[in-house]
Image: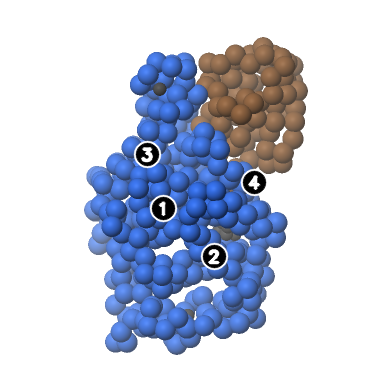
């Protein structure tokens, strides 16, 4: 799946399927610090993401950098 | 995950409430939380005219939207800071929001009116950008609220902001700040009443409000914010929150309920020797207020006195 990150805005590929929660864990992103948006709707942690989804991880902490890890492989 | 209210599909989980919500019931939850904060802290009534300080970001636009939805008379106020592209985009987000909803946006600008921008002003005054910016905002917000005859100035500070500031103040035992960290500050001569109606909602909720209401806010932040120490406090608190949902709310609201009173005595009685600034009339302990000194050092124009609006009685 395509994952859109911010600060700076960039796109990475992560292989699916995976739940939203597994994706966040894999990227070491704190659940409190982002909204996960698929298409134009919000999705909850238990939602399954498939390989052809495009999801945006939108930071909600004002001014925050949030994705530290460089993702590798499957979540 | 299912909505706690209607059992329909949830779009957001609030772990602090151990609940999921569908769009409709999430929006209702947010409106209820703001209404509750307004009532709990006696912020204002439907008869009051509210001026909302808007930055084009999620918190201030969501606040303006919610207050309007709740039936309050709320105008927006946007101050141009002259921070390059960030300021341009934040201005257009604020204008677009006001236009779409037929709301009144009052606009002023540091470069146009006072002849300096935040980066330049900070440099000239040898202050950190956020310090020069914060001081300028406070000054112009106060002045605009009073000159416009507004009953109250509302800002979009949310639970995360307040918890982070509290964390910093406790960490360093800034007792004089603890004494003043309240969701309502009463009006004083030359200063408007100030309120923070979002203190029961976190920033994740405010971002979700904007997404669900299709509010086009600026996601990218001010370039000057990098390295801001409140950011580190927010991250630290989110680590705690992830393991123990509800901690941020308990920390801040527990402080207000159980501890704040104990710091009252630390508050400096700071309006005793305030007198009108000789340049602009705003209350100041010195001869010329800090804002006018900044304007002067930054090489800008001297502000036009607004007449009696902000004058305090000389003592
Ligand atoms: S981050 Fe600092 S400089 Fe930027 S708008 Fe906020 S206070 Fe002003
Ligand atoms: Zn519902
Ligand atoms: Zn002055």
In the picture of the structure, the residue carrying the numbered disc 3 is: B31
Within-10-Å neighbours for mark 4: few <14, some 14–19, many 20+: some
Q: Nearer the viewer, residue B202 or A66?
A: B202
Residues marked 3 and 2 touching at CB (< 8 Å): no
Mark 4 or mark 3, earlier in chain: 3
Q: Which chain is brown?
A: A
Mark 1 or 3, closer to the camera = 3
In the picture of the structure, the residue carrying the numbered disc 4 is: B220
Subunit of label 3: B
- Left or right, A63 with reference to B188: right
Within-10-Å neighbours for mark 2: few <14, some 14–19, many 20+: some
Subunit of label 4: B
Mark 1 or mark 4, earlier in chain: 1
Q: Quadrant of the C terminus of chain A?
A: top right
Q: Colour of chain B?
A: blue
In the picture of the structure, the residue carrying the numbered disc 2 is: B107
Q: Label 3, secondary structure: give it.
A: helix
In the image, is residue B307 above or below residue B259? below
Task: State the CA–CA distance, disc 2 to disc 1.
Answer: 33 Å
Q: Residue furthest front?
A: B102
Q: How far from the left and from the top, in percent, is residue B276?
A: 39, 83
Task: State the CA–CA distance, disc 3 to disc 2.
Answer: 27 Å
Mark 3 or mark 2, earlier in chain: 3
- The reply to whether residue B257 is in sight is yes
Q: Nearer the viewer, residue B289 or B80?
A: B80
Q: Label 4, secondary structure: give it.
A: loop
Task: State the CA–CA distance, disc 1 to disc 3.
Answer: 29 Å
Q: Nearer the viewer, residue B105 or B85?
A: B105
In the picture of the structure, the residue carrying the numbered disc 1 is: B169
Q: How far from the left and from the top, in percent, is residue B267?
A: 30, 64
């Amino acid at each position: 799946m395509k994952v859109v990150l911010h600060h700076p805005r960039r796109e990475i590929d992560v292989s699916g399927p995976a739940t939203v929660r597994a994706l966040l864990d894999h990227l070491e992103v704190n659940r409190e610090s982002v909204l996960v948006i698929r298409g134009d709707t919000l999705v909850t942690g238990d939602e399954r993401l498939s390989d052809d989804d495009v999801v945006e991880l939108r930071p909600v902490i004002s001014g925050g950098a949030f994705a530290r890890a460089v993702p590798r492989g499957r979540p | 995950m299912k909505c706690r209210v209607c059992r329909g599909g949830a779009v957001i989980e609030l772990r602090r409430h151990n609940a999921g919500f569908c769009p409709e019931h999430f929006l209702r939850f947010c409106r209820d939380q703001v209404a509750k904060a307004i009532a709990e802290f006696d912020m204002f009534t439907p008869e009051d005219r509210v001026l909302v300080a808007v930055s084009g970001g999620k918190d201030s636009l969501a606040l303006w939207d919610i207050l309007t939805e709740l039936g309050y008379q709320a105008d927006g106020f946007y101050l141009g800071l002259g921070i390059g592209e960030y300021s341009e985009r934040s201005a257009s987000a604020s204008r677009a929001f006001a236009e779409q909803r037929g709301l009144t946006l009052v606009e002023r600008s540091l470069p146009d009116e006072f002849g300096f921008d935040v980066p330049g002003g900070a440099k000239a005054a040898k202050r950190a950008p956020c310090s020069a910016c914060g001081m300028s905002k406070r000054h112009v917000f106060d002045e605009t609220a009073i000159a416009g005859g507004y009953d109250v100035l509302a800002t979009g500070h949310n639970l995360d902001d307040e918890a982070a500031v509290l964390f910093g103040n406790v960490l360093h035992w800034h007792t004089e700040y603890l004494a003043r960290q309240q969701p309502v500050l009463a009006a004083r001569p030359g200063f408007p009443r100030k309120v923070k109606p979002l203190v029961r909602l976190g920033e994740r909720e405010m971002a979700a409000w904007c997404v669900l209401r299709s509010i086009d806010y600026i996601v990218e932040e001010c370039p000057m914010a990098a390295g801001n120490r409140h950011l580190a406090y927010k991250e630290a608190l989110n680590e705690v929150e992830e393991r123990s949902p509800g901690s941020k709310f308990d920390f801040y609201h527990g402080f207000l309920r159980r501890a704040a009173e104990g710091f009252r005595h630390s508050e400096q009685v700071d309006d005793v020797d305030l007198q009108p600034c000789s340049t602009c009339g705003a209350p100041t302990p010195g001869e010329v207020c800090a804002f006018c000194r900044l304007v002067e050092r930054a090489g800008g124009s001297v502000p036009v006195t607004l007449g009696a609006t902000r004058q305090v009685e000389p003592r």
